Amino acid sequence: MLVYLIRRTGLALITGLAVLTLVFCVVRILPGKPSHVILGDFASQAAIDALDKRIGLDRPIPVQYLDFMGKAVTGNWGVSMVTDRPVIAEILSVLPWTLELTLAALLIGVATGIPLGVLAALKRNRAADNVIRVVSLVGLSFPAFVSAVLLLLIFAIELGWTPVISAKTGSFKAWAQSLALPAINLGLINAAYITRVTRSAMLEVLHADYIRTARAKGVPWYAVVWRHALGNAMLPIVTVIGLFLGILIGNSVLTEIVFNRPGLGKLIVGALSQRDYTMLQGLMVIYTLLVVAVNVLTDLVYGLVDPRVEIR
Amino acid sequence: MSGAIGPHRVLSVAGLTTSFRSNRQWRPVVSDLSFHLDQRETLAIVGESGSGKSMTALSLMGLVTAANGRVEGEAVLNGRDLLKLFEPEMRKVRGNELAMIFQEPMTSLNPVMRIGAQIAESLHYHRGADWGAARIEALRLLDLVRIPDSGRRLDDYPHQFSGGMRQRVMIAMALACRPKLLIADEPTTALDVTVQAEILELMKELQREQGMALLFITHDMGVVAEIADRVLVMWRGNKVEEAPVRELFAAPQANYTRALIGAVPRLGAMRGEANPRRFTVIDPIDGRSVATEAETPPVTDTAPLLEVAQLTTRYPITSGILGQVSARVHAVENVSFSLRRGETLALVGESGCGKSTAGRTILRLIEPTSGVIRFDGQDIARLDQHQLKAIRPKLQMIFQDPYASLDPRQPVGRAITEPMRVHGMATAADAMDRAAAALVKVGLDPAMAQRLPHEFSGGQRQRIAIARALALGPKLIVADEAVSALDVSVKAQILNLMLDLQSEFGLSYLFISHDMAVVERFSHRVAVMYMGEIVEIGPRRAVIGNPQHPYTRRLLDAVPIADPSVRRRMRSRLAGLELPSPIRPPGYTPPERIWRTVDEGHFVQDVA
Amino acid sequence: MSIEAVAAVRPADRAGRPMDAFRSNKLAALGLLLLASIMALAALAPLISWHDPAIQDVVHKLGRPSLSHIFGTDEFGRDIWARTIFGARVSLMIGFASTALAVLIGSCIGILAGWYGGRLDTFVMQVMDVLLAFPSLILGMIVVAMLGPSVSNIVLAIALTSIPPFARIARAPTIAIKSRDFVDACRSFGFSTPRILLGHVLPNIVAEILVMAALWLANAIRTEASLAFVGLGLKPPIATWGGMIREGFDNILDNPWLALVPGTAVLVVIFALNLLGDGLRDAVDPRLKDAT
């Protein structure tokens, strides 16, 4: 088990480094020289050269690469070109907001999605299943920003249950109120995916021979579903939830914008529109770290759940 | 047969009818079935695919899905009609008074639950035992089914057991609550023949000890002869005949029974015969013999068509992040044999012995690690792909799974013409004619050339595969378990077809099989493989009539004989004689083998 | 089945043919219908919009639905209905183009990686995994931000993030088929690799790829709208759904219709495609259907 974990962590780190390399390439090799774009079309060559030097874009690419990788790994992510504050400080100040949103969404998704998926699989092709299928299909057909706008419209504006603009500080109630809608937005879309995956994983598992064996032994239904079916279905479900993280992050960006929540999403949109390259690099590093961390966690959970993993 | 209900009657079934609804019609898969079973008795239900035998078992267990299945009739177990019970009541019976074991041990156990827990489950839910007490009992059960080192194995997972061991675990699970009736649905079909022999032995012993009734479902007449007290023959959902086992084999009444028994070759029946014989085919409707049992002509050529020398195929197994070679599978190790024109050489052995790999290596579907393959004078092991292409039409293969050897999206006519066109053997029009002729030759209607494979039965697909191979004018055909997946009667027909084609075209066959009785009737010469090596080779009469190598003897000993008057004597009681796998550490060199000549053409590996 | 009557053939088994799916799966048929309707509307856009989507009428800005503007006007006085219809063209075009590109490139990569296996396979799949590891929306945002929001750049950005899933979805069945006997049979006949791949492997995996294509098309349209929403879509006066929703969001207190109309449109399209994809998947993978 330990060996497995070390191997998976190692692989994840290698993937992480590969993604960082990709990040480096994307920012540097794509057309549109940064300095040129920042200073505009009418800037003089001297000004461009000066900015290049300041950012470090005048050095040869391999040197820049090593410098970038070294700094990325050690946590020196430079200084924002717009606000002049250290990138890492900016990121860390908003990171908790994004993390709490993502976590809340994940919890809502799992707590809603798995039971509904199991129910749909057990009542296959009956009323409950059809309703759940259609509802989950509608749920994941909503682009995150459309549902966010809709929720905002109904609950914040028309009904006034939650504030239109998130409160940054305040009581627990205020905190809960400002987290509620964004978390529900992200969470329900997540739940829709999880419901579908759970349903198909359960259906697949319920056709397996060992379920027939369990029934032949006279094991009661609740035990068949819980110990035999769900125990095996969790394997593909956990894997897929890990894969959905990418979608979740993308959706969180949109959600943060609509609900005006501080977080990585707003930072990245700002950085993109203002061509804040150092901020962009730092953000991409943090996203990479997040994805790597989740991958390792998923592998860990998978390793705990699947006994065959030990023999690798 | 029927009649008074004795004091030891366990099961009494009357008018059992199971139907499924499709296209708004109810179609019966089991029709009006009646039988009974007493304590300590074994009733074998035998039939081919589609006979309804498995469905009978599922109906008794109440496992037929309610959605579009319907079970009618009466099935009284110890005074209670199972078919009238509602699900909560039936659940208490299942695994308790009535238990069942299934065919596929590999998939019938929950992969994420420990063996001990799976066995303890029945005790927990039926007897109310707490998990601790149930676990102790589970340990005792593992000993009962003779699993060595039971204490440690209690906490293992299914994937850590081999096929035979898993079936023992299934039996332990089924016997946990001391059922009155045990239903076994093809429990040994998926196992190697030596493992099968042990499991059958175990079941007979357990029946003696526990005193339960055994309902044994199978398609294998040899197994029936070994294990049954009475036999019930089913065909297309109906009972065709029921009789005590000796009576059934000695004097079958129904035409179908005669057809079934006739089609099964009996190991030992070819004693004294020199050449292969056609198989008996009896029409199931009118009972007349359809195929002659004529002997085939002997092989006259002396020059070999195929000569294989020191053929070796090894696969590396990599592990670790960098993919270092951690072990090698010695699938085929130093194999040598020759094959003449018009001759059939059988490669026999159990799973993992390398016979299939050897066949594929000869066709260069798998690359040999070393060795010589001399075909028609040329060493084809050395040829490159381009040169090989010219030879390919002469070397063909027929595969085991009729459902997988044809492209599901290609009409069968095209499947036959495509190879001809690729080799430039015929123009488009010509090819269609030749394909039609090939279909006729294998006994199919040429008008079916437009149809897709899934519209044909397994036997028909195998005929198409043969037609496809034949159309290229081959000299050698490698038949890799070509009839193993077919029903008994279909098997006989296909084998006869192959024998006819052999006489007509002078074909040579490399017949890869694990079925010794079929091999005895079909082949001129036999080579026995074990762990990648040939351990004994010679004329069929010599190897099967006078086996020298201990493995050959064990193999022949294990084959169930379809004749109840020849009952097995007790075999070894130990479990754990599972087949080892030929995985060796890298750098392993196999030891030198010494060969002994027993007789003319009959060689055996000396056991040190 | 039972004893063989050699000439008898089972009646043609029609399971697995996609057209039948529509007869039995009403929802998939509904999805197809919805999609076809929207495509028809988009194609007929100039005829049915009654207003030019680019003409501004600042006097009547942010107007509620009325007789002359059925869904009202946006903040520049442009007709919302017209802009929504024309926005459909943008979304559908970019969606189809990027999905088609991704299907072609991704499938080729997946099939070749699956077929040849070994080092090539490992390397290619590592690259795909790296791309997959990154949140696709953000990668798309970065690419468009760098290259500029033109039609081809947006198509490229979306295609780039779509290639890894198609590579995977083509690779898995290729590996499964590679080990099946009929492929070995083809090799034993000496068929060339291109013949086997194109004539025997591809026809057997095309169905699964198409199912994924339908589902992914929904995703592509969603991504295009999301990009437009954050300001990285096609610039005005070109009408995009995402852009309109953004405007609507900015003006939500004044006129909710501005956001609702394109929002509903994009929802309906994505929903229709999901229905369609689901229905196709049920037809192709009979295990998920009702067991007969």
Image: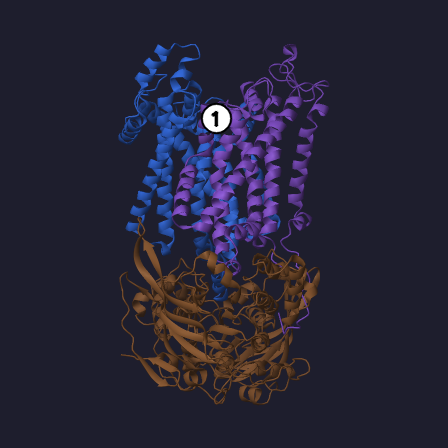
- Shade representing chain A: blue
Q: Is residue A184 visible?
A: no
Quarter of the figure with residue B28: bottom right
Dot 1 alpha-carbon crowd within 10 angstroms: few under 14, some 14 to 19, many 20 or more: many
Name the spot of residue B63 as percent of width and height, x first: 56, 65
Position in image of residue B306 (x %, y %) = 45, 72
What colour denotes chain C? purple
Q: Which residue is mark 1?
A: C144
Could you say whether the residue bearing mark 1 is in a helix, strand or loop? helix
Left or right, A217 with respect to C211, comes to: left
Residue B189 in the image: state x and y as whole percent.
48, 72
Q: Is residue B561 above or below residue C29?
A: below
Q: Colour of chain B?
A: brown
Question: Between A162 and C168, which is closer to the camera in this rendering?
Answer: C168
Front residue (pair B336, C119):
B336
Which colouring convention does the figure follow?
Answer: by chain
> Based on the displayed image, in which of its 4 quarters is residue C246 positioned?
top right
Is C68 positioned to the left or the right of B244 in the image?
right
Mark 1: which amino acid?
A: Val
Image spot of residue A291 (x, y percent):
38, 37
Which picture quadrant has residue B303? bottom left
Residue A165 falls left or right of residue B607 = right
Image vertical order of residue C159 relative to residue A60, above or below: below
The C terminus of chain A is located in which quarter? Answer: bottom left
Q: Chain of mark 1?
A: C
